[in-house]
Image (cartoon, rainbow, N blue to C red):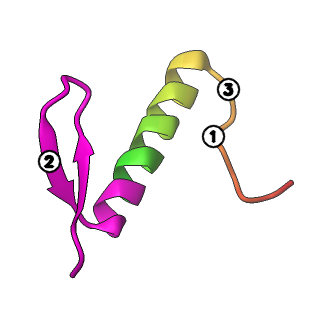
Amino acid sequence: MQQYFTRMGDGSGVYLSAEEIYSDLEAGTDDAADRGKIPELSWEF
């Protein structure tokens, strides 16, 4: 499994797989939608 170097919100470096990065992005956008009381992002246009 390939690992990609990225940074966490506090600036610390970490290696994550593509699946982990996607999951983290999805969780973050879902949390933002909940906090903003708006619909979650979808692939529908």
Region in magenta: 1-22
Rendered image: mark on residue 14: 2
Callout 1 amino acid: Glu
Residue that badge 3 annotates = 38
Identify whether 34 is placed above or below 36.
below
Q: Is residue 6 left or right of residue 26?
A: left
* Label 2 packing within 10 angstroms: few (<14), some (14-19), many (20+): few
Residue at 50% over, 19% down:
35
Asked whether residue 6 is drawn in magenta, I would say: yes
Rendered image: mark on residue 22: none
Residue that badge 1 annotates = 40
* Label 3 packing within 10 angstroms: few (<14), some (14-19), many (20+): few
Asked whether residue 9 is drawn in magenta, I would say: yes
**Quadrant of residue 28 within the rendered picture:** top left
**Quadrant of residue 45 within the rendered picture:** bottom right
Identify whether 40 is placed above or below 36.
below
Q: Give the image location of residue 14, x and y in percent.
A: 14, 48
